[in-house]
Image: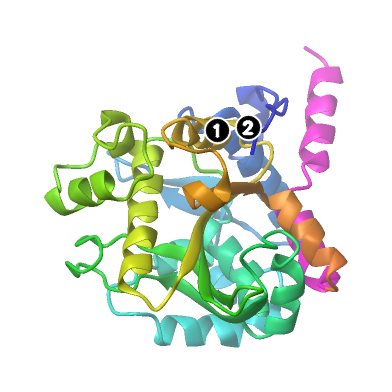
Amino acid sequence: MRHDPVPVPLLPRALLRAHHCDKPTDTRFRALARLAQSLWRSRQGLACGKATEPGTGRRRLLGSMLTPGAAKAGANFVDPALLPRVRRELVWREPGAVIEEQRLWGNLLSSQTLAFSLFLPLKHDLALATRTLAPLFPDLVGCVTGILLEHSPGRGHPAFTGDHTAFDVLVRCTTPDGLPAFLAIEMKYSEAPGGLATSPMPLLDDLSRTAGLYRDPDAPALRGGTLGQFWRQQLLAAAMLRQGPYQQGRVVVLAPAANNDIWQAVAAYTAQLQSPEPPASSFVAFTLETLLAQLDQAGGAAIAGPITARYLDFTPAYALLDQHLDGPA
């Protein structure tokens, strides 16, 4: 799970402003992803949408947003054939599922839209899902039996974590030995580590101490920001294994190779685990590129190709950067 940093440019603010992508709080990768999505939108012939600025309430053009009309038409999804399936997912979502529909349909940086675009086709082609995931998880995936989006086995239920922690995607499967198992997937795209520390939750603290996963189950670092999210998700997975019917499971983080901030958070979280080995730690992270390459090899080029081009091809942004640097001062 070792991941070397990928060079990401510090984009000039003048270049970002020219494409309505200047947000001072963006990390290097988020700024690059925002510009890449703005360029993708332009290539599709879609007008620039607006976003509301926090604090002031002012509406301004933002290159990574769609107009309401384009959002309603489903332009945020790389495959128009997915739209009926997306609508069905929204209608049949689990009670309490957190799906921000305005973001899902209109924000080009939404990792939830990415998760839907990638896993909804696999949900309806479990054979392709098996061919994709079994080589990546040979000890865990013998046959994929189902895929759920924005899933929790019991939001707020004391038999689990007692809070509203959920997984972006849950892949149900059987192991090569026929045991019931799961992959609990957290999808990241342009997100950066952050967030406030978790307020004291005795149920989570008790789970942390009895799970047998952490060097120091009471470590404050586990209770805030992105590490806190990984911690809560892994404790939910541990509770699922205790409650059944699953006998094996693993929390999986997916993120672009160039999102160095997320990979630093993954490394920091892994350092809190007693073992770095996925079978022992029940935790692993893969680059999104790795999964998409395996999907392509498994016969899913029609899915992997457009997603790779949309979310991971930064060459148009780099070309624009070169033009900007070579231009007049």
Give percent across and percent down for residue 88.
49, 87
- Identify the mark at residue 37; answer none if there is no mark: none
Which of 287/57 is in front? 287
Judging by the rendered image, the residue that carries numbered circle 2 is: 16
Residue type of the residue flagged with mark 1? Asp
Which of 285/218 is in front? 218
Report the Cα–Cα distance between label 1 and label 2: 5 Å
Which of 229/80 is in front? 229
Instruction: Look at the numbered disc 2 and give the secondary structure of its residue.
Output: helix
- The residue shown at (65%, 22%) is 10
Which of 328/320 is in front? 320
- The residue shown at (82%, 15%) is 328
Q: Residue 225: name its quadrant.
A: top left
Q: Are marks 1 and 2 in contact (CB under 8 Å)?
A: yes
Question: Was residue 38 drawn as part of the magenta stretch in this picture?
Answer: no
Give percent across and percent down for residue 128.
75, 78
**View extreme (front): residue:** 177
How crowded is the residue under tag 1: few (<14 C-alpha within 10 Å), some, or many (20+)? many
Give percent across and percent down for residue 241.
38, 67
How crowded is the residue under tag 2: few (<14 C-alpha within 10 Å), some, or many (20+)? some
**View extreme (top): residue:** 329
User: What's the magenta bit mostly, secondary-structure-wise?
Assistant: helix
Task: Give whichever of discs 1 and 2 has the lower sequence position.
Answer: 2
Give percent across and percent down for residue 224.
30, 36
- Would residue 103 be visible to someone looking at this image? yes
- Would residue 187 be visible to someone looking at this image? no
Give the residues in magenta: 300-329
Quadrant of the image containing the C terminus: top right
Residue type of the residue flagged with mark 2? Leu
Judging by the rendered image, the residue that carries numbered circle 1 is: 22
Question: Was residue 319 drawn as part of the magenta stretch in this picture?
Answer: yes
- The answer to whether residue 97 is above or below residue 89 is above
